Image: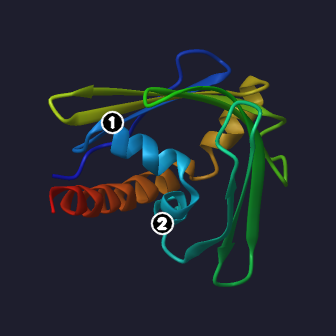
Amino acid sequence: MTQTLTLTTPTDHEVVFTRAFEAPRRLVFDCLSKPELVRRWMLGPPGWTMPVCEIDFRVGGRFRYVWRKASGTELGMGGEFREIVAPEKVVHVELFDQDWTGGETTVTTILVEKDGRTTMTGTVVYASKEARDGALQTGMTDGMTAGYNLLDELLNELKRSDAQ
């Protein structure tokens, strides 16, 4: 069953997204923290690849992602992990190379498991209302939906491997 991504804007500076996955929290957490797994699902819409996926997953550790479209267009971003509570919470800051989000954003991701199903809630705090609204106009919802659908496939594969 395909799950739905929901986005809300509870304040002028925030976007909150929620998505459920039919997988245990530890697997979802692994898919957020291990580069070999992240690069398999965090691709966005079809036609994009992720040639750079570097993650130093520890408080104070940095990460770097670069996505590339078949046409050669690149989109890069990096940041730092501020808080990690395995397997339930990750807080990081991020900044896109093109800075189309109006400065650094803070992202808090919470994973809650119930009956083998994990709900991910992410809160993105932007520097301003204009930055938040600009991010919402980029098509980020489409990219996130496509990525989370790929994450569903990866989680199903990982669950099958665990069962063997």
Q: Residue at x 25, y 44 (%)?
A: 23
Q: Residue at x 30, y 43 (%)?
A: 4
Q: Quadrant of the image for the C terminus? A: bottom left
Q: Which quadrant would residue 18 be assigned to in this image?
A: top left
Q: Position of residue 85 (x, y in %)?
A: 52, 24
Q: Residue at x 44, y 47 (%)?
A: 30
Indicate the secondary structure of the residue bearing disc 1: helix
Residue under numbered circle 2: 40
Q: Amino acid at mark 1?
A: Arg
Q: Position of residue 67 (x, y in %)?
A: 67, 67
Instruction: Please give left or right for residue 78 compared with residue 55 in the image.
Output: right
Q: Which quadrant would residue 83 be assigned to in this image?
A: top right
Q: Position of residue 162 (x, y in %)?
A: 22, 56
Q: Is residue 124 above or below residue 146?
A: above
Task: Kindly tell me whether residue 94 is visible in this rendering.
Answer: no
Residue under numbered circle 1: 25
Q: Position of residue 93 (x, y in %)?
A: 73, 33
Q: Which quadrant would residue 66 be assigned to in this image?
A: bottom right
> Exactly how many numbered labels are in the figure?
2
